[in-house]
Image (cartoon, helix red, strand yellow):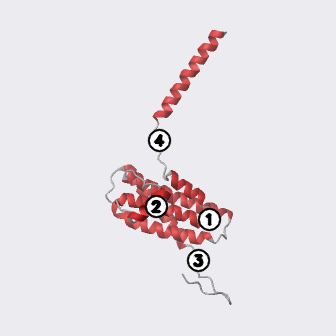
Amino acid sequence: MTRRILIFAAALSLLLSCCLSAAARLPQTRDHLTEKEIDLVRDAQALDKRIDVFIKAADRRLFAIKGLSATSAKDEKKDAELWGALPSGTRSELVGDIAKILDEAITNIDDVSSRDEKNPALPRAVRKLAAAATRIVEQLKPLQSSATDPAELSNFAELMDNAETIIEAAGKLSPDVAPQKRKGDKAKTN
């Protein structure tokens, strides 16, 4: 009886080690947000603030793709403390990251909309995201024509689909109406 238990334990241990080594060889999926960006998203509870984080994260990848500096040298140090270093990767990976960021922003907007359709932050968030998506697409459209890798073409297609969804949603919003001043309200000066 003891011998059977030992054989069973040895076989189980061999099976477990094979499973673990096979899992270790699987390619790791790429996160579309860095750890610091994930923390910033988590900290931004208001929808429009969270959308601002997604837009900044997408812009950081756009800067990395185009090889631009996001800020001045002075602001770059402060920005790096809060956001971390600019994301790295191939053009295909960075375009894929932007597509996933836009998708996550859409999901956040959909979640808020399903819980509170009258939330005043919804139209602001959709308009901000649509403006950013339009700007990002305009800058990446010329690069899309030079893409030849199937993965990169797929990432560009996903990005364009997500951007189109956002822009269409913004187009369905009623016109932005400025709040009317009430009697006794003082004009704000900045």
Among the two numbered marks 2 and 1 on one chain, the one whose residue lies closer to the N terminus: 1
- Dots 2, 1 in contact, CB < 8 A: no
Q: Nearer the viewer, mark 2 or mark 1?
A: 2
Tag on residue 174?
3
Identify the residue at image location x=37%, y=58%: 65
Residue in front for this viewpoint, 125 or 186: 186
Among the two numbered marks 2 and 3 on one chain, the one whose residue lies closer to the N terminus: 2
Q: On the image, which quarter does residue 96 sit in?
A: bottom left
Among the two numbered marks 4 and 2 on one chain, the one whose residue lies closer to the N terminus: 4
- Dots 2, 3 in contact, CB < 8 A: no
Q: Nearer the viewer, mark 1 or mark 3?
A: 1
Provide the residue designation for mark 2: 79
What is the quadrant of the N terminus in the image? top right
What is the three-letter code of the residue carrying label 2?
Asp
* Above or below, 148 relative to 110: above
User: Mark 4 to mark 1: distance in Å?
Assistant: 32 Å
Tag on residue 46?
1
What is the quadrant of the C terminus in the image? bottom right
Provide the residue designation for mark 4: 28
Q: Secondary structure at mark 1?
A: loop
Among the two numbered marks 3 and 4 on one chain, the one whose residue lies closer to the N terminus: 4
User: Mark 4 to mark 2: distance in Å?
Assistant: 28 Å
What is the three-letter code of the residue carrying label 3?
Ser
Residue positioned most to the bottom? 183
* Above or below, 91 relative to 125: above
Q: Position of residue 91 (x, y in %)?
A: 37, 54
